[in-house]
Amino acid sequence: MYAEEAGRIILDYYGRPLPVDYKADNSPLTQADQASHRFLVEKLEALTPDIPVLSEESDPGSYASRRSWKRFWCVDPLDGTKEFVKKTTGEFTVNVALIEDGEAVLGVVHVPVQGLTYFASGGEGAYMQRSGEEPEPISTRPSLPDRLTVVASRDHAGPEVAAMLENMASEGIEVESASMGSSLKFCLVASGAADFYPRTVPTFEWDTAAAQCVVEAAGGRLMTRDGKRLAYNKEDIRNPSVFTIGDPDLDWQRWL
């Protein structure tokens, strides 16, 4: 699996002193990001030469050139670079998704440090697989009316999420908060370990595509503020605020 191979490439750099560059948006960039990017783009282009690749570390080009894409690979070669640089949590991932007509139809989220992979494809369910073991099916869980586990970003939660947590508490809901880096937050919801992941600060399409496929195949939803499903190959590849729920019946919009 290409994501696992990319993960091994990343681990060759993990723990070593590396220079850290910063992109225009002040996000970090390392040699590991670039090595994983080169590997994945080379392999995907060889596998499907007629399908373009959109990677975090590549030039997305203009919407005029992208708007005709019916299918494309959406890749984050190293999601959670801040966690990679910290060398403390191991909470970084490799994300690979296939997009068709604006929808993530195949998704792979690999966690190199844990040797753990979450994956899904349209209509075939979602799975978790540990290195050397058989895949296990995963699914979201029903939410309880008086107790919820809410996942928040370690570095990017933001004041609006804090306000949402206060609104939940004001209703008498017991809220257990969990912090985590990278796309693993989505996977906690997909695997039934959490109920709700609100993300009100910016993400890009490569941050969410693979995980959205896993969440939806596991029975959950990933939506924008108006309750619509998050779509891909938008004119602006930055996502709006996104809200991930395990139980489709959870009335999360009342906390906004």
Image (cartoon, helix red, strand yellow):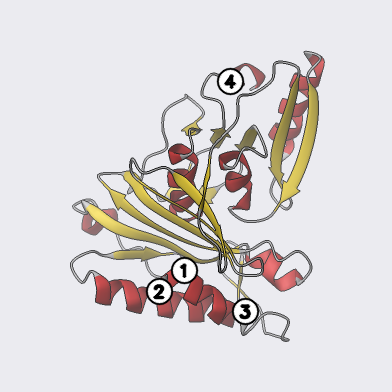
Is residue 184 shown above or below 145? below
Q: Residue at x 62, y 37 (%)?
A: 192
Residue type at mark 1: give it: Ala
Badge 1 or badge 4: first in the primary sequence: 1
Residue 30 or residue 6, whichever sits in front = 6
The residue type indicated by label 4 comes to Leu
- 7 sits to left or right of 125: right
What residue is shown with label 2?
40
* Relative image position of residue 26 (x, y in whole percent): 62, 64
Give the spatial CA distance, label 4 vs label 3. Answer: 38 Å
Figure label count: 4
Q: Residues within 10 Å of mark 2 (few under 14, many from 20)?
A: many
Front position in the image: 206 or 8:
8
Rate crowding at label 3 as few (under 14), some (14 to 19) or many (20 or more) other CA atoms within 10 Å. Answer: some
The residue lying toward the viewer, choosing from 75 and 135, is: 135
| Front position among marks 1 and 2 | 1
State the SS at label 3.
Answer: helix
- The quadrant in which the N terminus is found is bottom left
Residue depicted at x 50% and y 71%: 4
Ranked by sequence position, the earlier of labels 1 and 3 is 1
State which quadrant residue 40 falls in: bottom left
- Report x, y in % for residue 124: 36, 44
Residue 229, picture quadrant = top left
Within the image, what quadrant is residue 38 found in?
bottom left
Label 1 CA crowd tier, 10 Å (few <14, some 14–19, many 20+): many
Q: Amino acid at mark 2?
A: Leu
Per the rendering, the mark at residue 38 is none
